Amino acid sequence: MYDFKGKVAIVTGAGIGIGKAVLMQLARDGAAVVSVDLNGENAARAAAAARALGAVALSYAVDVSDEAAVHRMVADVEKKLGRVDILVNNAGLWRCDQGPFAESQSAFWKKKINVNILGTMYATQAVLKGMIDRKYGRIVNLASVAGVYGNKNMVDYSTTKAAIIGFTKALAKEMGEFGITVNAVSPGSINSEEEYRNNTELSFLGRSGSSDECANVITFLCSDAASYVSGQNYQVDGCRKKM
Ligand SMILES: NC(=O)c1ccc[n+]([C@@H]2O[C@H](COP(=O)([O-])OP(=O)(O)OC[C@H]3O[C@@H](n4cnc5c(N)ncnc54)[C@H](O)[C@@H]3O)[C@@H](O)[C@H]2O)c1
């Protein structure tokens, strides 16, 4: 449990999965939360669940690869809630269009680049001015073990997540003087669905992880308990077996 009272947090891709788990943990610990998702219904449902925990919660149906829409959303949050202290860039495409690179289509690469890389860059730039002015910020970017080791049949995806790790490390160096930390979290296999839970092939812990087990690390990095941690990539992968 952390103390996020008085803090405003935006989580992208908060409608389901890891993003929703992060939104709930931040709400549980007192943050005003902003649920952003391409799927507006899921975004609204997650915000309602956060309100049920007693939090102030807004929701937005936004495509993070739409730069103007991302900037409008952040401006609206700043107008309504006064500030943005925490940004979790979680929205990402990974389930779709997997297969051998030699047979893949550039249209698929571009979709992943637009959402996974540019979406993260747009949202980050949109919140930075306010964070720099207030000399406080926490930014956590979702990368992946695919970006560290490279995943077969996920070459385009692995490329985007390696870029996120580079983005995180470089930006952290620019933001240090402003009291803004920038970190990445690289999940291994995180799945809430029972059929995947006991997949011993994936990790030395002999199973995949839950969304909450991944959110635990993200929420820590959003907190003041992580005040001296920046420019890092935390792998949450149960000690990955396959690379
Ligand atoms: N689950 C895993 O095993 C795993 C492993 C490594 C990395 N990751 C990364 O963690 C993050 C979350 O993963 P997850 O498994 O919870 O994802 P998920 O696919 O379950 O959910 C992603 C959410 O992001 C939203 N989204 C997708 N494109 C969007 C866009 N353009 N704009 C706004 N929202 C958008 C979706 O609607 C969805 O609600 C992703 O960045 C993913 O690449 C996940």
Image (cartoon, rainbow, N blue to C red):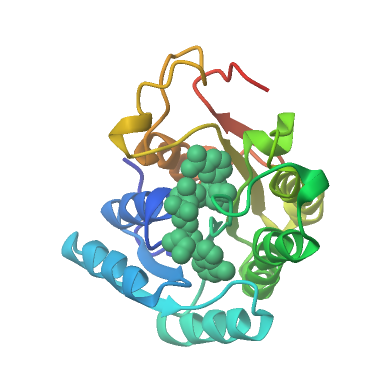
Kindly give the residue lying farthest to the front in the view shown. Answer: 103
The residue at 29%/33% (across/down) is: 194
Q: Is residue 66 left or right of residue 176?
A: left
Q: Is residue 119 left or right of residue 163?
A: left
Q: Position of residue 191 (x, y in %)?
A: 40, 38
In the displayed structure, 131 sits above or below 236; it is below
- Could you tell me if residue 42 is visible in this image? yes
The residue closer to the viewer here, 144 or 217, is 144
**The N terminus is located in which quarter?**
top left
Left or right of residue 37: residue 242: right
Q: Quadrant of the C terminus?
A: top right
Instruction: Please report the residue visible at 58 percent of the width from the left and 50 percent of the height from the top.
Output: 94
Residue occupying image coordinates x 35% and y 60%: 31
**From this viewpoint, is residue 169 visible?**
no
Residue at the location (74% across, 49% down)?
A: 156
Task: Classify residue 44 as left or right of residue 205.
Answer: left
Against 160, residue 124 (above or below) is below
- The percent position of residue 149, horizontal first and vertical second, equals 73, 29
Quadrant for residue 234, please give it.
top right
Q: Nearer the viewer, residue 41 or 27?
A: 41
